[in-house]
Image: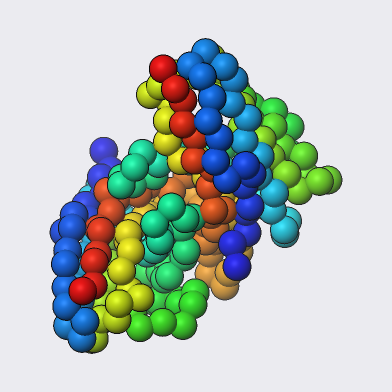
Amino acid sequence: SQQGEEDPQALSIQEGENATMNCSYKTSINNLQWYRQNSGRGLVHLILIRSNEREKHSGRLRVTLDTSKKSSSLLITASRAADTASYFCATAASFTGGFKTIFGAGTRLFVKA
Amino acid sequence: SQTIHQWPATLVQPVGSPLSLECTVEGTSNPNLYWYRQAAGRGLQLLFYSVGIGQISSEVPQNLSASRPQDRQFILSSKKLLLSDSGFYLCAWIPLGRVKNTEAFFGQGTRLTVV
């Protein structure tokens, strides 16, 4: 089963509004990552937050991490139509010999111009 | 700089036909390599991962197999495709030794339709 679970599954907002997406996970993590996927394309990494960090910013993106609740949130401020995409959280799970990145089901964001 | 190539971009194959999807990485050595499948409108399911040549781990039982004949080459195969194998297949890599704290880099994906 997937490690991360995002909510909401879909989000529709007006341009200029803020978009908040949440992610929950089940096991201990070393870091949590957020990715973006435009329709029919590969994923692009947005931001990584380590388990000892609580908040991180990158441009219009703000990520929080609460390891006690095993949850994270991604905030996109002042959204633009170009932000329309699917957003996934991912965690690194260990296996013998290395780590594997496990993704949640994603949130589909639609920003109306 | 490092790049990842995945091909073909789209593929339509009849049920029962074989499959071979190829992924190559340039500009790095000993990457950790991954194959994911994404159903329409869904998240990514990890299929296979590899930490080195000839070392393949399977995440879920299925009709597919993977091989790593060279350090920077990862191949996804099937002897006989099923309708349920349709989906969007993504190859990804993470630099060796940095898996704990770095992002995965993805190819552009292959959209497979089995008819």
Residue A51 appears at what percent x and percent y?
Answer: 70, 43
Is B103 drawn above or below residue A1 in the view shown? Answer: above
- Along the line of sight, the residue nearer the viewer: A78 or B109: A78
Is B4 drawn above or below residue B19 in the view shown? Answer: above
Q: Residue at x 47, y 63 (%)?
A: B45
Residue A38 appears at what percent x and percent y?
Answer: 36, 39
User: For the image shown, how many numbered marks are present on the structure?
Assistant: 0
Q: In this image, A65 relative to B54: left or right? A: right
Q: In this image, A78 relative to B93: left or right? A: right
Is A83 drawn above or below residue B37 in the view shown? Answer: above
Residue A80 appears at what percent x and percent y?
Answer: 44, 18
Q: Which quadrant of the rendered structure holds the N terminus of chain B?
A: top left
- Along the line of sight, the residue nearer the viewer: A98 or A84: A84
- Along the line of sight, the residue nearer the viewer: A96 or B16: B16
Q: Residue at x 25, y 77 (%)?
A: B77
Q: Which quadrant of the rendered structure holds the C terminus of chain B?
A: bottom left
Residue B114 found in image quarter:
bottom left
Is A33 drawn above or below residue A81 in the view shown? Answer: below
Residue A72 appears at what percent x and percent y?
Answer: 69, 40
Q: In this image, A38 relative to A107: left or right? A: left
Q: Residue at x 46, y 83 (%)?
A: B61
Say whether residue B10 is visible: yes
Q: Residue at x 17, y 83 (%)?
A: B17
Say whether residue A46 is visible: no
Colour mapping: rainbow
